[in-house]
Image: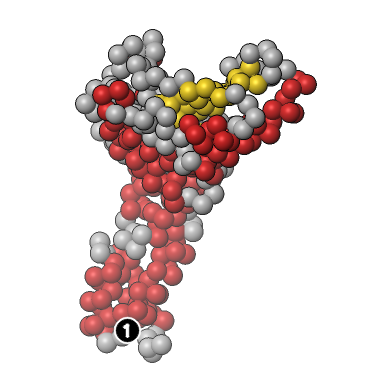
Amino acid sequence: MPRVSKKDREELVEKVLASEDARATARRLAADRDIPYAALWQWSVSEARRRALEIGAETLRSALSSRGKWLALLARCKADSTGCGYARLEELQECADLGDAELRRFWDLFPADQGDAETAEWILSRRDCPDDILREAVEQSRGLTVLAHREGPKWLLEEVMPLYPFEEPALTLLADYYATDEYSVGDVLRFVRSLPHAHREACQRAVSRRTRFPEDKRVALRMEVELSSAVRLRHLQGRPNGWLLGWDRDRHFAGFTACCSGYPCANLTSFDYDFCNTFEVGVGDRGQALRVRLSFVAPVAERYWTKKPIRKEQEALAALEEAVDRWIGETGFRLLPPEIGELPMDVELELADKDSTTLWKCLFADYA
């Protein structure tokens, strides 16, 4: 540590703190007096921090009461070119115990039609910012950057999202709300589908990186992307016609009958308006049948009962269901979750109108 008298040290620090560029002044004075810059800067910052701590919650609360007092406090903090004064103000703005009435009164001091309206926008980042102020800010499109980086509430992020050009509100909604048990896989899919393309891609990238994001929702989002791409590619030249494309009506039927050995099987495949193989295995004496569809558009399948088995039959038929599911997987197909199949698609079909076209219809069968 250089040998500098207390008086000289205080004079040097005062010159640094009184300057408009503290760092540049400290470098110049250190060179002139042949003392280490790091030491002079450390002395200056320590004093600046001590002075900044003199600004307490009561100082802040008093400044909130009038426009002039606030601007004076703001000028005082900004005059400290070390940054310590403004850092202290920001700390108090975030953590000081302030009431709703105090925040509202201060907000009203800097209305939207004033040139310095942004002066009051720091209160929008406070966790306890009153909802009425948040709503007013959204209506006036004030402080959108601050609002977009809040953790919530959910309604606020949803209202800011279409007003803010970047993806932060969508990412927060996805990670802090839709990832919770309160929202289903279908809710997540519909939310991500509703986003603009760039924001949707940002959310999909974020999901792939977040290790704590629920696995079922992660898988569903990835599957939706893959299937939507496959559907758009297959339907690019119009509705695919399996008869003209030479699709194999008997594809995998032999394996299906072997899987369902002991039960009568039927091949119901038609490519008139279907994009899949359709097989059926009959069971029982009430006309029950387990029907399976295997899509030609993407490697996904559907399996369902044409007539639901009664309770006493369910245990006996569970083994057949398991065998069919195992065969579907071994054949290279995945069962299509209903929440993915019901998603709307921007593809033109022949029978389904634009509003009723779903991913399922594009994968398996076109119908009105």
Residue at 31% over, 79% down: 37
- Residue 305 lies, in percent from the top left, at 60, 21
Image quadrant holding the N terminus, namely bottom left
| Residue 122: image location, x then y, percent | 41, 41
Residue sticking out furthest to the bottom? 3
- Vertical placement of residue 153 versus 85, above or below: above
Quadrant location of the C terminus? top left
Q: Quadrant of residue 184?
A: top right
**Which residue is painted at 27% across and 87% down in the image?**
34
Position of 287 relative to 35 (above/below): above
Q: Nearer the viewer, residue 234 or 315?
A: 315
- Residue drawn where x is 21% and y is 26% of the image: 237
Q: Quadrant of residue 199?
A: top left
Element under label 1?
loop
Say above or below: 368 vs 170. above
Q: Nearer the viewer, residue 331 or 115?
A: 331
Q: Identify which amino acid the numbered label 1 is placed on.
A: Pro
- Tell which of 255 and 123 is nearer to you: 255
Residue hosting label 1: 36
The percent coordinates of residue 214 (x first, y second) are 55, 43
Residue 145 figure quarter: top left
Tell me if residue 68 can be seen: no
Between 111 and 166, the one lying in front of the other is 166
Instruction: Name the residue at 37% across, 71% down.
Output: 44
